[in-house]
Image: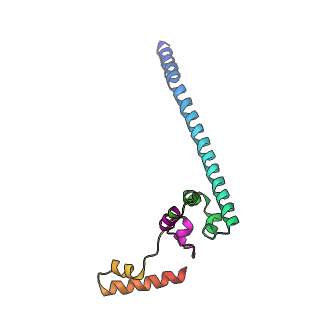
Amino acid sequence: EREREREREQLKWFTSVTEPRQRERERERERERERDSTNYKKKLHACKDAYVKAAAKNSTYLLSLRTTFPIQFKWIQQRESFPRSQEQKRAWRRRADVPVRQATSTHAMGFSRKKPSRRERLRRFQGTEKRKTTMMVKSMSQRQSF
């Protein structure tokens, strides 16, 4: 009887210690979940706004946006803050090396990558002749896939 009583007491004490902590943890999780969802919504809206703006400007570089809102978000943000002065504009063009002419898959994903020139490509693969030729073949097949 006494044994049971003691166990009950211990259990009471244990729950009194651990339960508030658990409740606190739960509350934290809830808060985080809410924060995440609101952030996501904000980002989504920002993306949609940017897309609408771009469509209004009749620009082609954001046409891939419909499918990739969340991924595209940061990239749009960068593209949205266009600088004003002539010099800044020039610097900006240098920085934004995403080609507007074609939406490659990487471009659609929002990663900017300048296509290396033929000379650069050859210099990079200057090991053996065989390697060079396979590289050329590869680049040809890539060109057709676009």
The image position of residue 109, as x and y in percent, is 55, 65
Q: Is residue 63 left or right of residue 1?
A: right
- Screen quadrant of the C terminus: bottom right
Residue 58 appears left or right of 78: right
Residue 89 part of the magenta-drawn span? yes
Quarter of the figure with residue 137: bottom left
- Magenta stretch? 88-112
What x and y, as percent, mark residue 100? 57, 72
Residue at the spot x=54%, y=69% of the render?
A: 107
Considering every residue shown, the one lying at the far left of the view is 127
How many numbered discs?
A: 0
Measured as percent of width and height from the top left, residue 94 is found at 48, 67
Q: Is residue 40 above or below residue 3?
A: below
Q: Residue 9: percent from the left, percent from the top?
A: 50, 16
Foreground: 23 or 76?
76
Instruction: Farthest residue to the front: give it.
Output: 86
- Residue at 46% over, 75% down: 115
Q: Nearer the viewer, residue 7 or 99?
A: 99
Q: Is residue 2 above or below residue 73?
A: above
* Residue 45 higher or lower than 130, as above or below: above
Quadrant for residue 84, please give it. Answer: bottom right
The chosen color scheme is rainbow
Q: Locate residue 139 relative to residue 38 in the image: left or right.
A: left
62 falls in the magenta region: no
* Residue 44, above or below 55: above
Residue at 31%, 87% (x, y): give it: 129
128 displayed left or right of 90? left
